[in-house]
Amino acid sequence: MHIGIIGTGYVGLVTGACFAEYGLNVTCVDRDEEKIKALKKGKIPFYEPGLEELAEKNFKKGRLAFTTNISEAVNSSLVIFIAVGTPPRGDGSADLKYVEEVAREIAGHLEGYKVIVTKSTVPVGTGKRLKSIIGGALRGKNIHFDVASNPEFLREGAAIEDFMRPNRVVIGAESPQAAAILQDLYRPLYLIETPIVVTGIETAELIKYAANSFLATKISFINEMSRLCEKVGADVHVVAKGIGLDRRIGPKFLHPGPGFGGSCFPKDTKALVTLAQENGMELKIVKAAIAANEDQKLFMVEKMKSVLNPLGEKTIAVLGLAFKPNTDDMREAPSIDILNALVAEGARIKAYDPVAAATAKKVLPKEVVYAKDAYEAVIGADAVAILTEWNELRNLDLGQIKKLLKNPNFFDLRNVYDPQKMKEAGFNYHSVGRP
């Protein structure tokens, strides 16, 4: 089977490379000519472990192609995935202009039956809208097509594993034919007995938003518990273990930190709140999770300020900038708000991130100075703060770190190190939600 993927961003490239690995013929389309030229040379425009090798392998085998010609993909494909961006508008709702533009372009090249699938995260009702847009653009031509939804559940930094060994696959389709075709695409997963959830389009669209909003709420909950733990002298890690052992709750997403970020949770929670408002209701729990997340980032600043006050003229070594490890994604990263607040207070920032420095420079204050490694960052600093739990930051030479610091203040905002051992090593150690 041949499939087309419109959009070569994070979702489009991961989806294309992985389907090609399944043995399908995949054509990825993007308007950006320079981007397509780079992809043909094996250059991936973002960092995702294993993706560059997977894409290069399948490109050389002829199963993965890149083009700017959308008609090439539409004409040769039975299934066409729409994987373009849905950025948030000012009110938090998803902007569907790129999705709708692609739908019109697809309609202009339809000559026979196709299944047109939204892979991008889109609000409930988008599938129905796209069916209307495509049908209208066909201007009465008797061409049969189906619209379907196949939301992605890819964690940045583990996207290939998530695609190849997913917890579930969700397929939203109106026609049995479209559902059967999409199920056939995922046939390799039957061997590992991956659950395939087949439902209506609206339900599939809502599953994606509901899943991300629930996980974001779980993160905000444990972050609020961490702040309460600091007030009463409890240990948030033991609290998380104690509640996580309850199978109704589970242990995942109960690790405290400076707040959630990335391309999904902030955008999707706001979009879901807006969707509810448009339908005459208020999602109070999701709104509270969003507010708690904003508070958590500022609480990290107050934690540092309480020790280093005044922050003016203090140098802080910040280790880790990306919103999570194994990615260079700085979208909505907690480091943005935290560093902006620290710089506004007059603090000097020396920062290090294994892969995200280039993207960080585009969104962080111009005053931030970047170091080549963690040890260079801490030289002469009044404090060090871990904002992203990269593996290489989990086993620092603490003796060397203490020697290089001007003052041994250590803010472990991801709870990487053991409090007792850090205090024994001579650090003025501060973590999240632990005595």
Image (cartoon, rainbow, N blue to C red):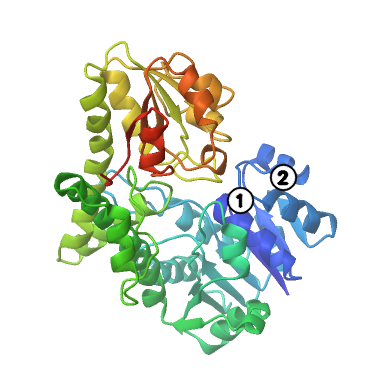
Pick out the residue farthest to the right: 61
Q: Is residue 303 above or below residue 313?
A: below
Depth check: 100 or 26 in front? 26
Which residue is outermost to the front?
424
Across and down, in percent, residue 406 comes to 41, 14
CA–CA distance in space, label 1 to label 2: 9 Å
Q: Secondary structure at mark 2?
A: helix
- Residue 373 as seen in the image, left or right of residue 65: left
Q: Which mark is residue 427?
A: none
* Secondary structure of residue under mark 1: loop
Q: Determine contact: label 1, label 2, CB under 8 Å.
A: yes
Kindly indicate the quadrant of the structure image that contains residue 381: top left
Q: Residue drawn at (19%, 61%), measured in percent from left and top?
A: 285
On the rendered image, what quadrant is the C terminus found in?
top left
Q: Nearer the viewer, residue 258 or 343?
A: 258
Residue at the disc numbered 1: 8
Disc 2: which residue: 39
The quadrant in which the N terminus is found is: bottom right
Q: Position of residue 112 (x, y in %)?
A: 65, 75
